[in-house]
Amino acid sequence: MKQKIILTISLFFILGIPSTQAQSEEVKFLIDTTIVILKNNAVNANTVDWDKLRNEAFVYAKDVTDPYQLGPTMRYLYKSINDFHGAFFYKDSTFQWRLNTSVVSDSIMNE
């Protein structure tokens, strides 16, 4: 009987931990808040599947425990909605995605 209880508790503990458990509450909050802001302000907000994007962002950030590690996830969000003007600011860090633009030679830039 004790073995069954221990096994049940062990399984509950192992299976009950979601994959995002490693993420801190602050990381989850920052991702969710960013998505809400993007959803309310993105030019092409009506063309984005926000639930799918949110799920993908959490999968992308599954091992992130510190907001300073959110750069790739935030860039992914901005890239997914094709927003190269926006940026995510966290304390002394800025994360943004830049649209690949053609390279302008130095001589043209100097003119």
Image (tube, grey):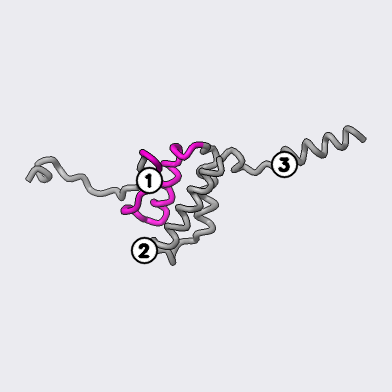
Q: Is disc 2 placed on a helix, strand or loop?
A: loop
Residue 74 lies within the magenta run: yes
Q: How far apart are marks 3 and 1 (CA)?
A: 35 Å
Q: Name the residue under label 1.
A: 89
Query: Mark 3 and 1 residues: CB-CB less than 8 Å, in contact?
Result: no
Residue 81: image location, x then y, percent: 40, 56
Q: Name the residue under label 3.
A: 15
Look at discs 3 and 1 and give the one toward the viewer: 1
Q: Name the residue under label 2.
A: 43
Residue 74: image location, x then y, percent: 42, 46
Q: Is residue 13 left or right of residue 46?
A: right
Q: Is disc 1 placed on a helix, strand or loop?
A: strand
Residue 15: name its quadrant.
Answer: top right
Q: In this view, does 1 lie to the left or right of 48?
A: right
Q: What stretch is highlighted in magenta?
A: 66-92
Query: Which residue appears at 25% of the width and 49% of the height?
Result: 101
Residue 27: image location, x then y, percent: 51, 43
Residue 106: name its quadrant.
Answer: top left
Q: How far apart are marks 3 and 2 (CA)?
A: 40 Å
Residue 22: image location, x then y, percent: 59, 38
